[in-house]
Each structure stands twice: as C-alpha cells, then as structure tokens.
Image: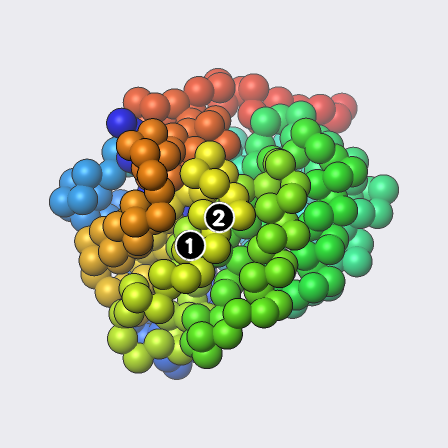
Amino acid sequence: MVTIDAHQHFWRTAAQEQSWRTSAHRLLERDYLPDDLDPELRQVGVDGTVLMQSVDEPAENDRLADFAAHASVAGVVAWMPIKEPEAALVELDRVRIERLCGVRCLIAEDPLAWLTEPPALRLFEEIARRGLVWDVVPITAAQTAQVIKLARLVPELKIVVDHLGRPPLDTGGWSPWADHLAELAQSPAVALKVSVGIDALTAWTAWDPAELDRYVAHAVDQFGADRLLLGSNWPVVLLRASYASAWNDVRLLLYDHLATDDERAAVVGGTAVRVYGLDPSGSVGERPADRNATAHP
C-alpha cells in the first residue's frame, strides 16, 4: 500500500510574502523545508507528498521547481493566474516543474463569475488536456455553483476541493457547508481532500480531532473512498498539532467510517495516485515533458 500526504507546503519566508499570514501565525514565520518534513514522513510511514503552492506569483513556481527535485515530492500543484486565462496559458508554457500534477490559485471569497466564460473554459480544457488537476476551495454558494457548472462544461477536468471545503469547525455549524459538499459530490470529476484549513486551525485553541468526526463522516458518505484524499496541510497544521498527531488522528477518523482495507488504502494514497497521476514509487507517471507540452506557438 502506497501512502501519500496529498497536501503540504514548503517555503522560505525571506523569499516570499504570504498575504494570508496574520499575527496569529507567528509559528509559520520561518523556513519550512524538505529536511524539516522528512523525519516526520518517516515516522508515520508516508511514502511521498503532493507539494502545494502557497503564494500567487510566478516566482512561486520557480521555488516549487527547486523543491520538486526532493525525493519525498511525488507531485506538485503549481500556481496559475486562473482569473487571467491568457496569462495562465503563458505561465503553463513557461513552467518546467518536475512531477507537475496540478494547478491552483487562492480564490478567497471571489464569486467566480468569470469561471465559466469562454476564455476560462478554454484554459480549463487545456489544463485537462495536459492531464493536470485543478485544486480549489469553494466556500460560498456562488462559488460552489460555479465549480459545479465548470465540472459539467469541462467533464474531462479533474477537480480537487481542498480542506473538506472548509466546514465551520470553529462554530460547529453544519449548513450550508453540508449542502454545498453534497452538491459538489454529484459531479463525478470532483474529489475532496480530508485536511484542516488555516481558518479552523486559527480559530481552535487546541487540536481536537473529535470536532472533525461528523464532517469526515459526511465527506465519506458523499464522496466515498475513491474520491477522498488525506492531506496534512503541513506546516500550517503545526499551529495546533504535531505532524504525527494530525496525520494519525485524521487517518483513524477516516478508518472509523470505512468498511474495508481497500477503502482505507484508497484514502491514504490510492486515490491521490489515481487523481493526480502519481507514480506509486514516488514520481509522476507521465513524463514531465508531456505535462508541460507547449500547445501554442
């Protein structure tokens, strides 16, 4: 069984400004590099990771390209200026990231009205043609509706929703999050990461996996093991828990709601390998040249 952490970051704070950091995130104001994560991966038995962008700028992709050479990185989700389709196509052609498997940008509460306009649709068709995944976190009704519409208009595009779609873990609320998740699950090309976002980690005063249980149960019920991916959100998760505690606690929560060994193997690695096109030995199955092939003169 291959084990993949489907969501983690590396960064050098001197090289990048992270607009999402606040005074509550002093712990994150330092470098987090492969040598910091490697012992944690060995401790819990993770074979490889999906490295995620954390800053919206071209220089982020250059940094990711350097990190991608590290042995633990099985795939990379790079930054793309999705809201500017022509610029995104240029960036797709520019980047040369080994093990590139997906793209994303930070959307915050943008209603995504532009998401299904013709230029954006052409961009997503090209992303799908290159075998890349689009990662996104739709949290509002408007965003959810647009992501669902996009999934219908570009059915070949694989979409991964990060951080459980950001349930209201800080308040213990349920709707409209649960309804949005059920709507997203109706689109077969949409998968879901079981990970905890910075919003909940900031609001919590302590790590409390029991607070996650009913949200994880709903995710399992709606998506099934074949569309769920386990991710740590390291180093952000260090705000409230060690890597080992966070990984094992959420993994065991998932196991409680999964009936078979095959389902458990899927959520801890098999789904990530299939959705992102990873090589089970720790590298992307397709050649990097295939993923970065230039489609425009």
What residue appears at the point 46 percent right and 28 percent down from the top-left corner?
A: 274
Determine contact: label 1, label 2, CB under 8 Å: yes
Res 8 visible: no
Q: Disc 2 marks which amino acid? A: Asp
Up-down: is 181 above or below 192?
below
- Give the SS element for disc 1: helix
Q: Disc 1 marks which amino acid? A: Ala
Toward the right, the furthest residue is 118
On-image quarter of the C terminus:
top right
The image quadrant that residue 197 belongs to is bottom left
What residue appears at the point 25 percent right and 56 percent down from the top-left corner?
A: 249
> To which residue does mark 1 refer?
217
What residue appears at the point 63 percent right and 59 percent down from the top-left corner?
A: 180
Q: Is residue 243 left or right of residue 129?
A: left
Residue 286: mark: none
Up-down: is 138 above or below 268?
below
> To which residue does mark 2 refer?
221
What residue appears at the point 71 percent right and 48 percent down from the top-left corner?
A: 148
The image quadrant that residue 234 belongs to is bottom left
Q: Colour scheme of this structure image?
A: rainbow
